[in-house]
Amino acid sequence: MTTGFAAIPASGSYVLRNARAPACLVEAGSLASDRNGLALLDIAVEDGAVASILPAGTPALDALPSLDLDGGIALPRLVDVHTHLDKGHIWPRRPNPDGSFMGALSAVAADREANWSAEDVRARMEFGLRCAYSHGTAAIRTHLDSLGKQIGISWPVYSELRAEWAGRIALQASPLFGIDAVADPVHMQAITRAVTDHGDSLLGAVTYMVPELDAALDTLFRTAIENGFDLDFHVDETNDPAARSLEHIADAALRHRFPGKILVGHCCSLSLQQPQDEARIIAKVREAGIAVVSLPMCNMYLQDRQRGRTPRWRGVTALHELKSAGVPVMIASDNTRDPFYAYGDLDLIETLREGTRILQLDHSDRDWASVIATTPADIMGLSSAGRVAVGGPADLILTRARDWTEFFARPQVDRTVLVNGRAIDRTLPDYRELDHLMASAT
């Protein structure tokens, strides 16, 4: 298959010469890197796996067929730790009426009730997976709306897709429902059963400042401990500084001495706290071992939106401060062409590109590429994903960009994606494939 460079060698053994890879994503001992944190390497591939990683120009590899990347940046296939595959691509039949968070909530609720059959959910989820695969994604965690009848619809569909996509994209799912639903024992039994029967040992909810928050968190933490689940929360997706459910989650984790992994998403209001409050909350988050994922494109789309008024802030969490304190941080795609975010294509290179601009990740640490690779892979328990390592799969994204300014200046549409050392067909699905779902919608 032709690529942005030339043909990938047909041989099962070959060398990618002069590949420039982020040192933070390469497991090969000490690497010399440039001011961009990029190391110039020769990567040998054998039978679909990485056979060796050596400094560029190593003579020992001269006998093998090779492809010269000419200094182009090579990344591992990437990890999208916070998405909503079940909501994806409903915008044409149920747009957000005003672009607001409440508009998104009401539009999704109406569409879910009217249209989310197993056939509908499956078609849209698979469409999203095909997009992500084409762009170079190796693993996805999706949240599944889990209220009432939808529990019995979306979870079996998810389980089937996880099996069908094994070997292409590793899938995980976490249930999504409001924290107030935790008080209903019938609901919690149904959720626990769905995760046990169809899921990946993950439990979660949307947290907000309600009087019963701490009691509900105690129930969730106890349920997670009893069943060996990890936790994944939607947290404080608002510009209200009084929204501090993140601190309540940290307190609950410490109170229960929670042994599993905890991921929290959004945490928008953290960046609007007074400095002393922000520092206190971040210290608790670190002590509790909580990881944080920011969703820059979706949060910038929804937060601080008022008709006829220019937004005054970017809507994202205090990611730099969290990282500086030692909290594992990452970014992810979130929603795709639904009322919460009208755009997107589950392309993590776009997410890193836009996240770098929105969160100003440049002019700081040189390891920010880890936020869409090794860090989310570790949270998902995927030891071989999101990194280039000897013995690991030759799952790579090859680009013509030679440094970060070239990489971010263009969308890298000519990238080559390797899965087990072979270039995949990157043809994206046509939106027209979903027209029958939009036309027949209620």
Image (cartoon, rainbow, N blue to C red):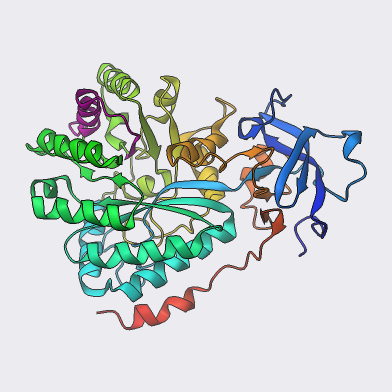
The residue lying at 37 percent from left, 34 percent from top is 292
Q: Position of residue 206 (x, y in %)?
A: 23, 45
Is residue 293 visible in the rendered structure shown here?
yes
Q: Is residue 400 magenta?
A: no
- Please name the residue shown 29% across and 57% down the image: 197
Give percent across and percent down for residue 223.
20, 41
Of 358 and 37, which appears nearest the observer? 37
Check the image and report above or below for 41 versus 197: above
Q: In which quadrant of the rendered image does the N terminus lie?
A: bottom right
Q: Is 17 on the left or on the right of 354, as rendered?
A: right
**Outermost residue, top direction?**
276
Residue 297 in percent (x, y) is at 42, 48
- In this rendering, would 327 be left or right of 46? left
Is the C terminus in the top left, top right, bottom left or bottom right quadrant? Answer: bottom left
Q: Within the magenta stretch, is there residue 253? A: yes
- In screen coordinates, is 372 left or right of 33? left
Q: Residue at x 49, y 59 (%)?
A: 345
Identify the image quadrant of residue 362. top right
Q: Which residues are magenta?
A: 241-265
